[in-house]
Image: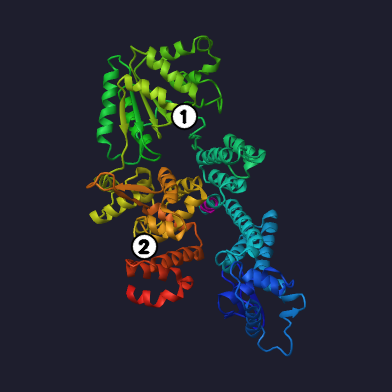
Amino acid sequence: MNSCPAHAMRFGVLGPVEVLRGNVPLDPGPRQRRLLLVRLLVEDGRPVSLDTLCRDLWPTLRPTGAASSVRAHVSRLRAVLDPVRQGRSTLLVSDPSGYALKVPRTARDTALFESSVGRAREALRNRRLPVARQEIDTALGLWRGEALAEATEHAFALRERARLDGALQDARELRAAILVQQGETEPAIDAAEDLVLEAPLRETSWALLMRALYAAGRPVEALRRYERFRGMLATELGLDPSPRLRDLHTAILRHDAAVLGTAAPPSGTSLSPGPGLTAACVHPAPGPATAPFVGRREETAQLTALLSAATAGRPRWAVVGGEQGSGKTRLVEELSARATAAGFTVARTRAGQALSGNRGISPTCPTVQLLDALRQDGKDSAEDEMAREDPLGTVVHELTQAPTLCVVDDLDQAPQGFHRLLRRLARVLREAPVVFVCTLRNGDSPASTLLLAELAQLGATWLTLEPLTAGDVAELLAAHGEDMSPEEAAALHRRAEGHPFTLTELLGLPPGRRTGPQAQVPAAVRGVLHARLVELPDQARTLLTYAAADGEWLDVGLLADVQGMAPDQLLPLIDAAVTARILVWDADPGAGGTGRYRLPELPRDVVLSTQTPSSRQLRHAALARELANRDDTDPARLARHLRAAGPLAPTRIRGSALEQGH
């Protein structure tokens, strides 16, 4: 809490209960006495009867001498809080109605917090951004952990804790809004990502994230976040986003600075959306990207061979699968550059749609969308009379004019109409110098099943992009001109799990921040992992907090015990985390069907970063208690948890366990 005059007292409940006289902390005493102090502070000066105190302090098994114990705790608490009183205490008072703690409003951290938030909000309204930032940082600095930490399992604290948690969320949203207004977009994005992870159905937090991403020149990601929230809202509650959020979505599509309250993104920033949105189609096709292209030699060779085969007039199809960020786009960009150099016309669509340069978002039919991607003359296919009369015939005509590479990104996200169009083309195209390359994230998507089955019968080339190897990482580093030892390259490969997108983002960090004790999580990677965590059930996220505290490998039995669950109850939560690509299953190559679950470095770092220090200490303390009851526990492992638990470590096992751990 803030410093105060030597004679003043301050009380804090925004974390473990705290009492200060001036700047000197006072010790309220053991846990039950601290709980009594919290109970009285929650009541805000109103008296609490002796019977209510007994019931609240011992909600399950009330000891025989509960009333006497409360009186003794009150007496000792008075001795700490009001040691030099003359006669009856005016601070911790008693009367026939019960006990009350008479504390001035300004002596409580909750009141100081609310006052600072109010001043920050007023300063933001008046556009005094430095003052608003200072006030909100002061307010949030008062939080030392979870509110009413001693009373987390007690019913009397539920309402006040819910109120304080809501006020904290409001304050953090206010801080993110201030950061956006100050132009500190990356911190604003990080703050908003944390908010949507903790409250995934809170629309205000999603709106802030969309604004922050747009202000950072990342409108595509802003639109994707809207789609993710809209899908989550429909699945969880059967609702649509509010009109206000829909208006924000439209403003981003139109670059409407008046609605967004920010400047439009830098020129050259295109809306190249993901699932459910239209995509840009650029003519001519882009040349090779500036980032080094490593690995994928076999895949590149197979796709390049299709170009050669297509020049003989035989259509060729290829399907490239891989999770988001696995390098599908980079691979087809390399192929597009080679096709352009060989005289091919290159057309691209994303999720089955194209964005015409002069029409904006086009809701026209799939055939017209594909025509817009194919045509080199700039005509609006929706206004072309021939295209209206015979759209499929016009597409076939365009495909037979010259050797053509047609790239369909995110096929599994395209509407059913586009799948039907491709199936018809696969049947009627028999003599055309064309190569279709379709990329998709989920090869098991029901939407793509029929098309993929027909392509399989046509002998389509199938490629699945696996993680890059350690050798590929060394090649990438050399291409970047970095001299890194084999051990350092291996550490970078391990941290990125061979994921091309993650590797590229890690290489954007200073060398000392990529791996090791000072390692950071790149903002873009953090955003992707946050998005995956948000979509998990609450219980699965709780499981991950314990797993992250314990280490890389999952001890399923320990995680079940610490949460009071049977192992078979835990498995669906683990499966959900594996499906979300947070956890991975490492099979044992020496024995079929066996292996272990693992929480990789970057997801673990992100999970840990979403918790307050006191929350992490609670997790370590709970794990330590369970490990202490095991006969085969590694002393060093137990000691590590006890040290990490800090003041929350179980005192009955702390001393001897720490001694053995050394």
The image shows residue 362 at horizontal and vertical percentages of 55, 25
Q: Is residue 661 visible?
A: yes
Q: Earlier in the sequence, mark 2 or mark 1?
A: 1
State the separation of the CA atoms marked 2 and 1: 41 Å
Q: Identify whether 29 is placed above or below 426.
A: below
Numbered mark located on residue 558 in the image = none
**Image quadrant where residue 410 sits:** top left
**Image quadrant where residue 5 sits:** bottom right
Q: Identify which amino acid the numbered label 2 is placed on.
A: Pro
Q: Image check: 53 left or right of 469? A: right
Majority secondary structure of the magenta segment?
helix
Q: Which residue is mark 1?
A: 351
Magenta stretch holds residue 477: no
For the N terminus, the quadrant is bottom right
**Residue displayed at 33% across by 32% down:** 334
The answer to which of 13 and 10 lies nearer the viewer is 13
The answer to which of 502 and 77 lies nearer the viewer is 77
Q: Identify whether 553 is placed above or below 244.
A: below
Q: Identify which amino acid the numbered label 1 is placed on.
A: Ala
* Secondary structure under the numbered disc 2 in the rendered image: loop
* Secondary structure under the numbered disc 1 in the rendered image: loop
Q: Image check: 610 left or right of 157? A: left
For the C terminus, the quadrant is bottom left
Q: Image check: 102 left or right of 11? A: right
The image shows residue 380 at horizontal and vertical percentages of 53, 18
The answer to which of 508 and 389 lies nearer the viewer is 389
Q: Which residue is mark 2?
A: 517
Magenta stretch holds residue 192: yes
The image shows residue 248 at horizontal and vertical percentages of 62, 40
Q: Identify whether 381 is placed above or below 46.
A: above
Q: Residues within 10 Å of mark 1 (few under 14, many from 20)?
A: many
What residue range appears in magenta? Answer: 189-194
